[in-house]
Image (tube, rainbow, N blue to C red):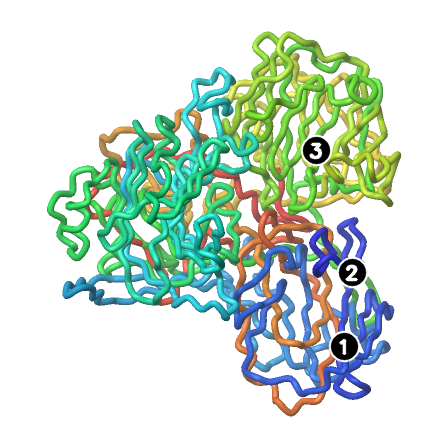
Amino acid sequence: MSCYSKYGNKPAANLLERDGSWHHVAVTWTAAHNGTTKIYKDGLLMAEVKTDATEPLQSGGALMLGGDQDCYGSCTDPTQAFNGLMDEVRIWSVERSQKEIINNMRLVDGVAGQPGLVAYWKFDDPNMAEDLTGAHIWTAMDSSGNGHHLPLVTPPQKASVTINQSGRSYQTGKLKFHNNYALNEEIGGMPETDFTVEMWVRTPEYSATAEAVQRSELLSYATHTVGDSSGRQHYGGVTDHAFVDDAILIEKYYVVDMMLGQGYTPLSTISVSVNANPRVNEGQLNHWMNFDVDWKDNKWHHVAVTWSCNTGKTEVFFDGIFHVPTWRTSEGQWQSKAAKDGGVDPHMAPQTLRLGNGSLVLGQNQDCYGGCFDPQTSFDGDLADVRMWDQVLPQERIVADMFTASLSNSSGLVVRYDFSAANIKQGTPGANGIARSIVVDSARGSPDKALYLWSDAPRFEVSTAPLADREGQAVQLPDTFYGDHALFLSDQQVLLVTNFHDFPATAVTVEFWMWSVDNCNQGVPFSYAAGAYSQGDNAFLIYNYNNWEIDIMEDQGSHGDRNAGFGSTDGQWHHIAVTWESSTGIATLYLDGRKAWSTVRAQGMRIPSGGTLVVGREQDCMGGCFDSAQGAAGDVQQRYQLEYGAQDFTGVIDELRIWKTVRSQGQIQQGMASDLKRAEPSTEASDRVSPSDPDLVAYWTFEEGSGYLVKDVTAHKHDLHIQQPPQWRVVGPQQVCGNGIVEGLEQCDDGDSVGADGCSATCQVEEGYECSGLQPSTCWPAHTHPNTAATDAVDRRSGKNSHGLFFLIGAVVTAAIIGSAALIYAAGDIIANQWATISPSLPSFGPISGSLAGLAWPLWGRGGEGYSGLAMADTELYSSAEGGGAISDRDAPANPYQAPESAPLLQDPQSFPAGP
């Protein structure tokens, strides 16, 4: 099913191929015959075992799809998540026979009403004729008539609270978190140097015997380090311009540390990371400290963290009391010493700078901008009165203002979220009439610092499952709206150009759009080889899409600059561009039009022409020696030769271009805009990338949609040859103005198509206005303010990150599923239903499958994301539930800004997620 489909060291039965095809899966169980369980694939019996499990199933449990519950409704393991697409899920209270499974598995109607059908989710909830995104769909309806509807969104819940401690009390608002979050992925005006973060926190009482989460993420701020664009290394051998997902990270967890002389007694610690990314440069940007605070109860506690940029001194005050660090890791070096012995050096990451614009999240830890959350470490508990300052507050000032809403001095307060009722707002109703709740920052009410409350949600897509009507006639699959296609690649495909006679020698830009949910492999989208192994096989290699790397003329970097520290396998369409010039050796990677990583490769060298280009596979010799698992297409290396494991690209690729110049960031952004508009019939030719551009060496649009050739639309005729039967994908429109979601080239979307309100009828910010990055957009008259944005930000807002959902099915029931099981990503856990209506006396359950001719559900775990069609319930939306809302910043100066660009959410696909 995936690279993680195993339990312990024993691999699970592999019933599905890794080619991304749809398959029907059915599992039956009966208490009779010693609990016999059977597994069917595409109607054929694949496995049968007597389990001796004969006790009746109990009602009242929690049902989820896509993962495994280790505690009631939670405690999921991302490595056991289902990664792919689901459609036509059915649960029956009888053991279905093979004949019944075969007769019904492709049906799109006639299933509801059959005896024994307990639940049936068709995932046809969006109206395809009127709604291209399904973004407002927050419940998947049960078509069985039994009312087992699946809620898709469970945001943090608001409430009032009185905090009592040591004779002092404080009445304020709180948010209750349970695997959800408060997020602003385009926040500006954050501290670039010194900071203080304060908050009130309550977590469940620690139990050594309970299967409880041992790590809780409180606050996460992600951005980039500040570089000088030289590509050279800074900060002790670290890449010049690096992504730091842990620019500011505060978390609580229990750790057993034998080196501190505590035996196996867990230490309840507060952990602080500053300007850090453990995945960058082999640990050179790994800066964090642990503070043992003996926090095991379920009472309210005040947490304050300070950091000085000049010295790197880091302090933690727990309930106003100073604590020394007991563990320190900085620049790859670590220390450990018990508090009673004085603790460790309290300094880390001195004189390192981060950008003041990025993504802020409460309740989750970001591994990418605004997403890539891990449900195992999500916060379960309450937060109240979160404050952030751009200075180091002294202990006496922290203690003085812990229990008051009226601060003695608000100078330096950047943002404050007190979660009081006055600061929890309802968002603007979208075109569908549904108001998504938002939360405004309470420092001065500046809308650009607002958080929104949400949880990971599934995305609806047009289904391409092989379904049929009652006469056995295949249901017509969707076609492209504008004739745009893309190509699905895997280790079952080889896409290549031989004798590439004019590959750029001293300056090059390679850019393309990609979509993947493969969290397993170091996938390679682009491999140009001009020689044998270690003699030019890596002449120009873009690889490891889970933690990007660049290899040019066998120069893959050193210990300090090998990895970018981020990947692109989160189930979103991403634009990747890599530039390189020989004279300086500077190689730069752009993610979605934003400069994300710079380093130096192969300075002074020339790339030979006449080599072989392979898209989607890694060559160790020209046109072969692929680093692939056994069973892959083409010339495959022996297992012992796979130094980095299988490196095949699994996903979809589109709009691939090679230039013989170093494209500027502005030019890259213009190319992105061209791609996003190209499929529209009304697009002017002047808005498109011209195939006759003298700097363009090759350009593959993937518009063919059929056949074994991807045409180079330039005059150079570097056509890509498809060596195996192709899997063409249809990609639809990228944006729908007026649906309340900022997507594609939209700068705003306030949920209507009316102008003169700040957001125009074409979803562009009108002159004299500024708009927030929230969903739907909130616009206000512009005023004079400092612009803290990175100058290289793309001038638009994007509504990315549904982070893939994975529904969990925790009760021992049988379900029939049609799904694509080849793609991987892990995301948030969604409790699907309280299974209250199954009778405890039922002796058995059994499945059947049927399907819809319409939409499907993508399910995935954490680290990538996957799907299958048109409309989406996107994580950028706002809940209309009581707990949803936005918080305002009362005390900090207003500072609207141009935020760093997030990945463009190219939604509204047809047979696959929307592409460029």
Within 10 Å of the Cα at label 3, are there few (<14), some (14-19), or many (20+) other Cα atoms? Answer: many
> Quadrant of residue 42 in the image?
bottom right
Say what secondary structure mark 1 lies in. Answer: strand
**Residue at 78% across, 67% down:** 106
Say what secondary structure mark 2 lies in. Answer: strand
Quarter of the image containing the C terminus? Answer: top right
Q: Is residue 750 visible?
A: no
The type of residue carrying mark 3 is Pro
Nearer to us: label 3 or label 2: 3
Disc marking residue 28: 1
> Quadrant of residue 772 in the image?
top left
| Disc 3 from disc 2: Cα separation | 26 Å
The type of residue carrying mark 2 is His
The type of residue carrying mark 1 is Thr
Look at the picture and state if 507 lies above or below 524. above
The extreme bottom residue here reads: 841
Within 10 Å of the Cα at label 2, are there few (<14), some (14-19), or many (20+) other Cα atoms? Answer: many
Side of 598 where 348 appears, left or right: left
- Give percent across and percent down for residue 92: 70, 80
Asked if disc 1 and disc 2 are in contact, CB closer than 8 Å, the reply is no
**Residue at 81% across, 29% down:** 496
**Residue at 80% across, 39% down:** 628
Disc marking residue 525: 3
Say what secondary structure mark 3 lies in. Answer: loop
Disc marking residue 729: none
Disc marking residue 23: 2
- Give percent across and percent down for residue 36: 80, 80
